[in-house]
Image (cartoon, grey):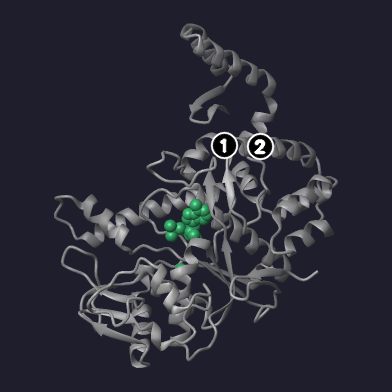
Amino acid sequence: MPLRLYNTLSKTKEDFVPLDPKNVRMYVCGPTVYDYAHIGNARPAIVFDVLFRVLRHLYGDAHVTYVRNITDIDDKINARAIERRGTRNVPVLDVLRELTEQTLAQYLKDVAALGTLSPTVSPRATEHIAQMVAMIQTLVAAGHAYVGEGHVLFEVASKPDYGKLARRSLDDMIAGARIEVAPYKKNPMDFVLWKPSDANTPGWESPWGRGRPGWHIECSAMAEEYLGETFDIHGGGIDLMFPHHENEVAQSEAAHKEHPFALIWMHNGFLNVEGEKMSKSLGNFVTIDELLADWPGEVLRLNMLRSHYRQPMDWTVAGMKESWNTLERWYSVVEPVASRRIGAKFLEALSDDLNTPQAIAELHKSGPEELAGGLALLGFSAIPEHIAAKKAVDTVEIARAIEARNAARKAKNFKESDRIRDELLAQGIVLKDGPGGTTWDVKK
Ligand code: AMP
Ligand code: ZN
C-alpha cells in the first residue's frame, strides 16, 4: 500500500509521490525560543518525527531531508530580551542570543528525551536575514510588496488565490480577523515582511533602514534555502494554518513566479490538558521539562501517538498511566528478542495518513518480532534504564504504600505518612506529589 497523506490544501487523502525519491523534502515550523516548551509543542515534534521515520523507512535514511526552523527573532522574544537586559549596558542583540541559545538548548534536550531524531537541518532565523531581505526585494520588484513608513508589506490583492489554503475569501478574512489597521497599509489584510526597529530593539541594516523581518518571511526564506522553490511536505500545528501558512504560500509563490510551494500541507490537531485549553492563567500549563521529571520520555511519546495526529487530543494523567503500563508490558516481551520484522498491517496503518492508534492496535496483536520491529520504527528503540529499573520493583507494593500514605495524610497523621515516604526512599523509590496525585520514580 502506498503512503497516503491528508493534504489540507486539497482536503483529501492523497497518494504520496515525492518530487525526487532520492531527496524527499519536508519543512516543519519549529519553536519560537523564549520560554520552556509545553506539551502541546511536543505534538508536532513527535508527529513529524514519526513521519520522518516512516519516510526514511520507505525511501532510505539518506534520501529524506527534514528541515525544522528555529524562530529566534520575534516580538515576544524581543520583549523578553529587553526585560532580561534590565539596566545592564549591553547590546540587546547579545541578550537576545543568550536567551534564545538557553531556550533552544532546553528545547533540544526536551525533544531528544521524547525520542525524536535531529532534523537534517535546524536553521536559525537570525542567520538567514540576508535571504529574507533578498526575497523581500524580489517581492517589491515584482509588484507584490510595497514600502510604507519604514515597513514593507505584502499586498494580498496582488495575489488572486490568496486564501486558498485556509479556504477563505478576502472579505471573510477581513470580517473575521482581528487585524491591525495601520495608516501605512493599503488593505487591512496586508501583512508585514519587514518592520523598523528603534535603538532598543534588535535590528539589521536593510534597503528600508534598520529593522527586522516579519515572522512569515522567515519560513519562506529558510524553506527556499534548504529545499528549493517546490518541495514535498510542509507541516505544523493547525493554529498556524492561518495566517502563518497562508502567508508563507502567498510570499513564496509570488517570489517564485507562481511555481508551487509545498505540495502537501499537514496540520496536527490541538492538544488540551485534562479537558481544558492549556493556559498559564488556568494553571494547567505543563512544560515538557516538568513532565519528564515524573515520566519517562517514551511514556510521553507513546501517549502522544495513541491519538491520531489530526484529531484534537486530551492529555491526561490517566492516559499517561495507561501508556506506561503498555510500554512495560511490551518491553517485557521484546527484551529477549533478537530479530525484528515490520508487520504488514502495522505498516499499512502508518501508511494510511499516519494512523498511529491503528498501528498501536496492530502491535497489541503482534508476536514479539513484529512488536520489536514496530517499536523500533516508531522510535522506541532503547529501553531507558529507569523503565527497566522500575520493572524490577514491585509496583503493586508501591501503589499500596502510596494509598496508605494518602490515607494517613487525609487523617492528618503526618508522622505515619512521613514514615511511609522514608521507608520507600530507603528502597530507592522517590515520591512526588503533583496536582494529578502522587507519582513515583526510581532514585537516580
Ligand atoms: P510556537 O513555538 O508557539 O510557534 O509553536 C510551535 C509548534 O507547536 C507549532 O507547530 C504549533 O502549532 C504547535 N502547538 C502549539 N500549541 C499547541 C497545542 N496546544 N497543541 C498542539 N500543537 C501546538
Ligand atoms: Zn513557519
Relative to 108, is 267 on the left or the right?
right
Identified at 65% across, 30% down, the residue is: 389
Near mark 1 (Cα within 10 A), the count class, few <14, some 14-19 or many ≥20, is: many
Reading the image, the residue beneath label 2 is: 324
Residue kind at label 2, given as amino acid type: Trp
Mark found first going from the N terminus, 1 or 2: 1
**What is the secondary structure assignment of the residue under circle 2?**
helix
Near mark 2 (Cα within 10 A), the count class, few <14, some 14-19 or many ≥20, is: many
Identified at 65% across, 73% down, the residue is: 63
Question: In this view of the protein, which residue sits in the foreground, 367 or 172?
Answer: 172
| Quadrant housing residue 285 | top left
Label at residue 295: 1
Q: Are marks 1 and 2 in contact (CB under 8 Å)?
A: yes
Question: How far across and down, in percent of the image, does residue 99 sit?
Answer: 32, 53
| Quadrant housing residue 51 | bottom right
Question: In this view of the protein, which residue sits in the foreground, 319 or 87?
Answer: 319
Query: In the image, is residue 432 above or below residue 339?
Result: above
Identified at 24% across, 65% down, the residue is: 202
Question: In this view of the protein, which residue sits in the foreground, 167 or 266?
Answer: 167
Query: In the image, is residue 205 above or below residue 315?
Result: below
Residue kind at label 1, given as amino acid type: Trp
Question: How far across and down, in percent of the image, does residue 321 sit?
Answer: 64, 35
| Quadrant housing residue 275 | top right
Question: How far across and down, in percent of the image, does residue 159 sit?
Answer: 44, 86
Q: Is residue 308 visible?
A: yes
Label at residue 337: none
Query: In the image, is residue 136 above or below residue 385?
Result: below
Question: How far across and down, in percent of the image, does residue 221 sit?
Answer: 42, 77
Ligand 1 within 8 A of label 2's CB?
no
Ligand 1 within 8 A of label 1's CB?
no
